[in-house]
Image: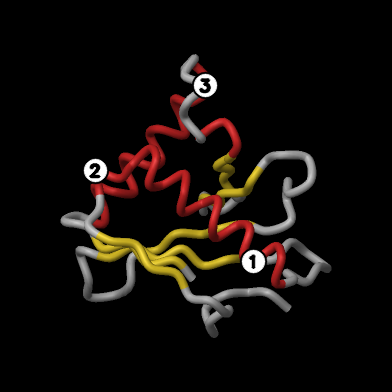
Amino acid sequence: MITIKTGSADGFLNTLYKAFEEKSTEEEPEKELPTWDCKSSPKGTKYFTHNPKQWNGKAWFRAYIPPNTTDEVRFVIVKPDNAVIESAIYSHYHGRFIAMLFSNFGNTFISITATSLPTSEDSVN
């Protein structure tokens, strides 16, 4: 799990989602957004996946704001149907996602932490 501390959880997520909606029109190769996709489920839940061929669709991140908080966003990892997320996938996704957040949104949050192992909120098995 990745946890972001920010001044406004809603504001952070709105900025993140807007950047992904607009990424297809940007020509900025230094940004790491092109290596990530944000897709919506039929129910409207947004998921992030790393899109290089080797990693594409191996896992997904889903963001949520914990109840009774306004300054925290959590990203839990979600396995694809009929798959298991192995430690190499877990660590790669966390490291690359955090790097993308620092590179592109570092001025929108206070701190970021990640668990070294899946939590009960992550779906890896």
Residue 82 drawn at (x, y percent): 83, 68
Left or right, 42 with reference to 67:
right
Category of crowding for the residue at label 2, using alpha-carbon neighbours closer than 10 angstroms: few (below 14), some (14–19), many (at least 20)? few
Q: Please name the residue that numbered disc 2 is placed on.
A: 107
Q: Which residue sits at x=55%, y=51%?
A: 96
Q: Amino acid at mark 1?
A: Tyr
Q: Which residue sits at x=64%, y=46%?
A: 50
Instruction: Using the image, tell me which numbered label, if any, was put on residue 72.
Output: none
Gap between marks 2 and 1 measured at Cα: 25 Å
> Callout 1: helix, strand or loop?
helix
Gap between marks 3 and 1 measured at Cα: 26 Å
Residue 3 drawn at (x, y percent): 37, 67
> Callout 2: helix, strand or loop?
helix
Quarter of the image for residue 40 reads: top right
Q: Please name the residue that numbered disc 1 is placed on.
A: 90
Gap between marks 2 and 3 measured at Cα: 19 Å
Category of crowding for the residue at label 3, using alpha-carbon neighbours closer than 10 angstroms: few (below 14), some (14–19), many (at least 20)? few
> Which colour scheme appears in the figure?
secondary structure
Left or right, 104 with reference to 57:
left
Category of crowding for the residue at label 1, using alpha-carbon neighbours closer than 10 angstroms: few (below 14), some (14–19), many (at least 20)? many
Depth check: 113 or 1 in front?
113
> Callout 3: helix, strand or loop?
loop
Instruction: Using the image, tell me which numbered label, if any, was put on residue 29.
Output: 3
Residue 61 drawn at (x, y percent): 55, 58
Which quadrant holds the C terminus?
bottom right
- First reached walking from the N terminus: tag 3 or tag 1: 3
Quarter of the image for residue 37 reads: top right
- First reached walking from the N terminus: tag 2 or tag 3: 3
Can you say whether 10 is above or below 17 in the image? below
